[in-house]
Each structure stands twice: as structure tokens, then as C-alpha cells.
Image (tube, coloured by chain):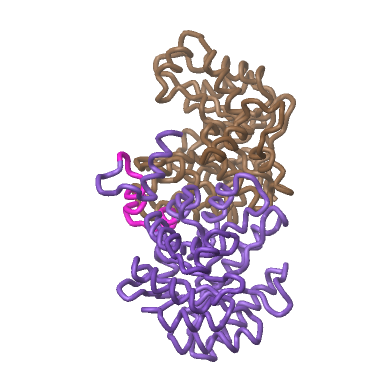
Chain colours: A brown, B purple
Amino acid sequence: MTRTVLSSATKEVVIGFDVPFVVIGERINPTGRKLLAAEMKVGDYSRVEADALAQIRAGAQMLDVNAGIPMADEPRILAKCIQLVQSLTDAPISIDSSIIEALEAGLAVYKGKALVNSVTGEEEVLERVLPLVAKHGAAVVAISNDETGISEDPDERFQVARKIVERAADFGISHEDVVVDPLIMPVGAMDSAGTSALNLIRRLREELKVNTTCGASNVSFGLPNRHYMNAAFLSMAIGAGMTSAITNPLHEPEMAAVRGADVVMGHDPNCRAWIRAYREPPAEGEEGRGGRRGGRRRRQA
Amino acid sequence: MTRTVLSSATKEVVIGFDVPFVVIGERINPTGRKLLAAEMKVGDYSRVEADALAQIRAGAQMLDVNAGIPMADEPRILAKCIQLVQSLTDAPISIDSSIIEALEAGLAVYKGKALVNSVTGEEEVLERVLPLVAKHGAAVVAISNDETGISEDPDERFQVARKIVERAADFGISHEDVVVDPLIMPVGAMDSAGTSALNLIRRLREELKVNTTCGASNVSFGLPNRHYMNAAFLSMAIGAGMTSAITNPLHEPEMAAVRGADVVMGHDPNCRAWIRAYREPPAEGEEGRGGRRGGRRRRQA
């Protein structure tokens, strides 16, 4: 049973084949968020704080933290954000950067076992990121593209994933500490994107025995009613064996799809988490919980 | 490629492995609907009319028609309802009764190739229903229980399904005209209900090569936020190979789960059906379409 154990100073979260699906909150990321980028650049982290707390309330078990702002001191800002988020929540963090110095700075201040996001199959990236992951005893997200870009052929994406897992092993990193992102293509761009994704998720699990993750909202790119499309895909991907996703936990269709899939997979004994999220009326002391919002919306529907 | 071809006088609908999922509208059924039962009993079919039209607008490709009213002339009422629904819509019908005389009366007036709902694995039922299905060249829903009731063991339910398929063949009914209902247990009652259901759906498809259906709302019995649980289950069941469901098409989470799963399975080329259902703003001339409601709700969310 493959288990990727991540931790903060005080809490462990397990990504694995026989445990509930892990939602990694994607919101702390200035890409495409001009206001957040401008604030982070001048040292105003109030929105980072709010995003961290809101995502945890909504049900994220981990948080992705990205500080990729053009012309800014990304290593310093990323380290600052990680320290801030760790002071506010006990959720393990996915340290997200394409800049090695930023990953280094983030890992240097991180308390616990982090998920490094990410390594690709490109030689230069493998050679720089994997030693860092090994040195810190971290886990890593492996994105299945290489020097040739992202292949449309799922077999090639599988082979890139296999290469990363093998290279990680050379650095002493177990396959249990490699979480593969098979790169889900938008279903609106290619009719075979969905079935390719499901097959790839199954193969990664059965043949490489690795956990998987994805940026779930990419699947619906360009389509209307995106949250419901993401929701359908998430449930089906969990049915095929996907074990985590980097996504926005503030959207109810997606979170209900994940929680419902956990129940269907038998990973929510006695439906406890489902009932806690959606019982009506909500119990006292749960003001503002994401689950409660879901319950409310249902009553109005 | 297994294909169950149903028809009305003017339209064919195919339940199959490589075509869009078929939603069979469940609403025309007096069970648990006192007002509808009372009206049908005295010959007022206005609600049957409204239910037929609303379900087709919402996206049902077929309609289930049931007239099971205690102390009423079920054969006569069922035949009447079928004639009425066939005069209003071109959707093929699932003729739903546990009374052989009602099935006979329904089939006698039906135009096209009907789906007879249902036969079980009970000897007496097999011996009475299968000849009738064969005589009319109809297809049949096979419910996987027998004299011993509904087994909690999915292997036993599979064996009952196999028996029905074999007995149908003895009567000249192809496995393509047997749509198996594997009897989905509520996930709230048994933690293994979901995985059992998915495994059973896969086995029915791979080993018996049959289409499958289910009463999808049963899965969420006893739980809060039922529509989202049904939605997660439906998407996952389609991912496992389920090809139709008898369900309520008026609920948006379930319909979006079905439409989204069709896209992910590659059964909605260029996402045409998805975009037609959810494009914003809705095109003129689509007043009151189920899909449009979905679009609207999204904008408010």
C-alpha cells in the first residue's frame, strides 16, 4: 500500500491508496491574481493569511504555496509565506516553484516533511531538484513532461513518469515519495483527454505503484459550467485511483465530488466526513465551515 | 460492442458501451406520490403529461412509465399512460410493472421496441416475463435478485444476472437485449456498497457483455445532500462502465454528473451536448430547457 506521508511540525497527512483523497488548496498563488501579486511584492501578506484559513475551513488537508512574481525576490517571499502559513495552520505544505533557489529557501524554513512542487523529466531539473528533495527528506510532485514538452501520447507521459521515479530512486527517494501529475489535458481540446487521463492514472497506480495528483480545474478549460465538469472528472479520477489534487477547495461541486467519491470508494467509514460536512441543520460551533455552505445551498436548490 | 436498441414509432435510442449514457426518467410512477396516484386512478393524466414533457426537456432520452396503484386496474391505466406519453413525446418507454397482465397490456399498445421493466431471477417470474419479452421483440431490465431475496454478496448478484442472461438466451433474447440492474445498495448502510457496485458493473460489462442500469438515487438513501452523492456515484459508475440509469432528470447535480462523465468518457464529441446544455447566455428559443436552468444556477453560485 503506497503511502506518501507529509507533515507540518504537529500534523501528518497521508496521500495513499486506502485513505481519503487529499485536497491541496491551490489559492496561494499569484499567477493570474494581480492584486495578490502586488501585495506579496510589497510584503503585504494579509490575503495569503485569509486564503490559508479559508481553504482549511473549506476542507483542504494541505496547502500549495507559490510566490512566482515577475521581478520579485521569489526565494525570500516564498520563505516568508511558508513561515506565515505554518504559523496559522497545521496543514503540510506543497512548496511550489520552478526556481531552485526558491525551493531551497522554502525547504530551509519549513517545519516537517514538505511536498516539493515540482520536478519534471528534464535532465537539468532532475539533477537540481532531486538532490534537494533527498537532502531534506521531502516528497516531490513529478510532472510528466520533459525537454520535448508535454506529449499528447499518454504512453510517452507514462514513460516520463517512470523515468522520474527511477531517477528519484537513484537519489534514495522512494517511489512512495514521488506523487505523479500525469498532466490532464482539457477535455474541450481533445475528445480522448478524459479516457487517456483515467487510463494513465490506473497505470501509474498499478505499474509504478505511485500516488497521483493533478491540477483538476485544467480539465474544464474553455468550457461553460466548469465546476460541474471538474466535479465529474474528479469523481471519475478517484474511481480510477487518483489520490490527491491541487485544486480550489472553495467550490462546492468539486468538494462534494471528492467527498462523495471517498464514500463510494469506502474511504469514509460510516459516511462520517460526509455527514459532518452536510448534515442539516449545521451543528453549533461550525460557523463558516465550507461544508455548511454546501448544506445551505442544497436547501435552497 | 453491446448495443441495446430501443425505439418509439419514430425514434431510436441506443444504450451501449460507446455512446452517451441514457437517462431514463423515473417520475411517472405513483409509488410514494399520493396525489399522482389518486389522479391516475380517476383518469386524470394531466400530471403524467406534465412529467413526461418536463423530463424530456430536462434531458431524459427515455421515460419509465409505472402505474402501480393499489386496488386499481393497473393494466388499463398503464396502457392508457403509455398511449398518452407516446402521443406527446418520441422517447422510447420503459414499461414498468411487477404484474404480468400490466406488462402485457402495455406491450399490446406500445409502438416500437420497448424496455420491459423488469424480470428477476425468480423462476416463476422468468417463466412468465421472458416469453412476453420474446414475443414482442422487446428488451428487458434484469434485476439481480431471486427467490432468496437480494444478496449482500456481489458475487451472488452476479450469478443471478448470469442466470437471467442465460435463460433469456433460451427464449431467443440476445444478451444485448438484457439490461442488468445490479441493485446498488445505499452507501450509508454499508461501507463496501460503492466498491461492490463499481466492481459488479465492471464484471457485468466485461464478463457478460451486458448493458447496465440502476435506480441511482437509492445509493444516497438516508444521507444528507443526496443529489451530490448521487452525482458522484453516477460519474464513477459511468467510469466503471454503467450505460444507463432510471433516475430523476430534473436535478441538476445528477444531470451535470452524467453529461460531464459522457465528456470524460469521450462520448460527447467536441463537448457539443455539454456546451448546448450549459452555454451562457442561453440561446433564444430554449426557454425552460433543463440545461439552461443549470447555466443559470451556475451564474448565481
Q: Residue A244: percent from the left, percent from the top? A: 58, 41
* Image: A87 above or below A140: above
Q: Image quadrant for the N terminus of chain B?
A: bottom left
Q: Position of residue B157 (x, y in %)?
A: 66, 73
Which residue appears farthest toward the front when viewing the image? B42
Question: Which residue occupies 31% across, 47% down?
Answer: B287
Residue found 34% across the figure and 72% down from its top: B12
* In the image, residue B41 lies in the stretch drawn in magenta: no
The x, y position of residue A190, in whole percent, is 35, 51
Q: Is residue A138 visible?
A: yes
Query: Could you say which quadrant of the image residue A12 lies in?
Result: top right
Query: Which region shows up in magenta?
Result: B262-281
| Residue B15 vs residue B52, the one in the foreground | B52
Foreground of the two, A117 or A137: A117
Residue lying farthest to the left in this orientation: B284
Number of numbered callouts drawn: 0
Q: Main secondary structure of the magenta part?
A: helix
Can residue A132 be seen from the camera position used here?
no
In the rendered image, which quarter is residue B237 located in?
A: bottom right
Is residue B269 highlighted in magenta? yes
Residue B258 position (above or below residue A104): below
Could you say which is closer to the camera, residue B22 or residue A269? B22
Nearest the viewer among B143 and B68 is B68
Identify the residue at image location x=68%, y=59%.
B193
* Location of residue A86 (image quadrant): top right
Which residue does the image show at 54% across and 77% down from the upper left?
A: B73
Residue A226 locus on image (x, y percent): 42, 41
